[in-house]
Image: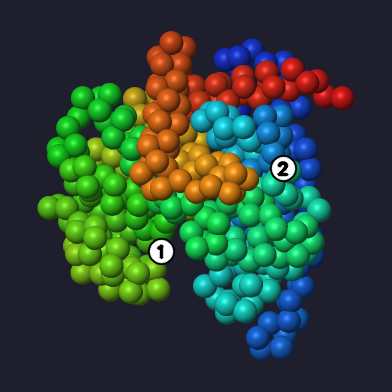
Amino acid sequence: MKAFEATKFFFDQAADQLDLNKNVRKLLLTPQREVQAQVAIEMDDGQLNTLVGYRVQHNNARGPYKGGLRYHPHVDLDEVRALASLMTWKTAVVNLPYGGAKGGIAIDPRQLSRRELEFITRKFVDQIHTFIGPDIDIPAPDMGTTAEVMAWIMNQYSKYHGFSPGVVTSKPVEHYGLPGREEATGRGVGLLTHKVTGRLGHKANETRVAIQGFGNVGTHAAKFLCQIGYKIVAISDHTLAVYNNDGIDVNEAMRHAYANDRMLKGFKGGDNITNEELLALDVDVLIPAAIGGVITEENVDSIKAKVIVEGANGPTFPLADVKLAERGTIVLPDILANAGGVSASYFEWVQNRQHYIWKMDRVRQELDSVMTKAFDEVWYHAQEHKVSLRIAAFMIAIERVKYATALVGIN
Ligand code: GLU
């Protein structure tokens, strides 16, 4: 199933609960604008390479478009469209004054030199700078992009429009960024894992967690959970998956990854397993925090975790999600679980406009408060309407976007 179809499936389930008519569904599902731009580059070896960059602006009824920019070989228009719509529901569920967008280019940043990466980024900004802006559409990192890429975007955009730190978020702290933004997505995932296991009456030190993905989200989620007493029994990335019944030494794993080009390969902190085995471990909590579409109809029956917290965007395919709901597995959906990143992006954006930067403690405090409020709302909504947390989150988000649209009309 293609990514946008999968997102539409969840949207429709919530829309059925809300009794939304077909015209409103179509309005809320159709992206407002899709930009496809040529990004041509002369590679280091002298070859000409013509790429296509995408920016899909899904909805701005509640505020400027907001969402990441993804550099990954699998990027295509359908995926960017799906991720853009997820951003609309994500910003609405945590109640930020933003809409939703996403961008992407089908490249593998690991295979490119720094010069090539910078050139592609700046060229893409040349092509889309009239479509983005601090009041229009504010990109941020996603898979394969970093704070440094954001600094290039800000710098290139500012050449056309003057000093504009608010055009992009998750910049380096030395360059108008926010302390605490980098850890925010993982921290939010950790915090909500703690909330949900608490609701189920589990104690932190008796809760075993497996995390797929040891990038920005996975590492910070692991660190946060470890610090409050959870046992991380398995971690993985695209180079290695390890299991340790006594708990992985997360700090050691992070040190190893930082020293090895961000890869776990060669880490000796447990027994080597496969990524499929990690997903099927008998743990209390499974956190898919890598790529999309990893929990499928084929492997869902092997999953034993009682709670799944979606650190990644779109890790669970619809039919697998239905099965998980039927057998009572609790799934904390991506649009809530990983919303800590965009929430901290919002703090950064507000402060860029005020030329005032908060200290880390304040960022954490405000982040925890935004995430906790959204979690409580979704949890009670799910109980009240007897639906899964995913459908509850979509219902709250759709209602908010629909209301904002109705307030101003479509003219
Ligand atoms: N790419 C992140 C996400 O999917 C962050 C988006 C942002 O900060 O705008 O939520």
Q: Earlier in the sequence, mark 1 or mark 2?
A: 2
Dot 1 alpha-carbon crowd within 10 angstroms: few under 14, some 14 to 19, many 20 or more = some
Dot 2 alpha-carbon crowd within 10 angstroms: few under 14, some 14 to 19, many 20 or more = few
Q: Residue at x 20, y 56 (%)?
A: 248
Q: Quadrant of the C terminus?
A: top right
Give coordinates of residue 36: x percent, y percent. Answer: 78, 56
Please tell me whether residue 249 is drawn above or below residue 364 in the rendered image: below
Dot 2 beta carbon under 8 Å from ligand 1: no
**Closer-to-camera residue (217/135):** 135
Q: Which residue is mark 2?
A: 135
Give coordinates of residue 35: x percent, y percent. Answer: 78, 51
* Whether residue 280 can be seen here: no
Which of labels 1 and 2 is toward the front?
2
Give the color scheme: rainbow, by chain, secondary structure or one colour: rainbow
Q: Quadrant of the N terminus?
A: top right
Please tell me whether residue 361 is drawn above or below residue 370 in the rendered image: below
Q: Which residue is mark 1?
A: 238
Which amino acid is tagged 1? Answer: His
Q: Residue furthest right?
A: 411
Q: Residue at x 57, y 79 (%)?
A: 113
Q: Residue at x 40, y 64 (%)?
A: 238
**Closer-to-camera residue (79/204):** 204
Please say if the residues under marks 1 and 2 sit with CB atoms less than 8 Å apart.
no
* Whether residue 206 can be seen here: yes
Secondary element at image label 1: loop
Q: Residue at x 78, y 21 (%)?
A: 408
Alpha carbons under labels 1 and 2: distance apart: 37 Å
**Closer-to-camera residue (201/184):** 184
Does residue 117 appear to the left or right of 41 in the view shown? left
Does residue 312 appear to the left or right of 235 in the view shown? right
Does residue 111 appear to the left or right of 300 in the view shown? right
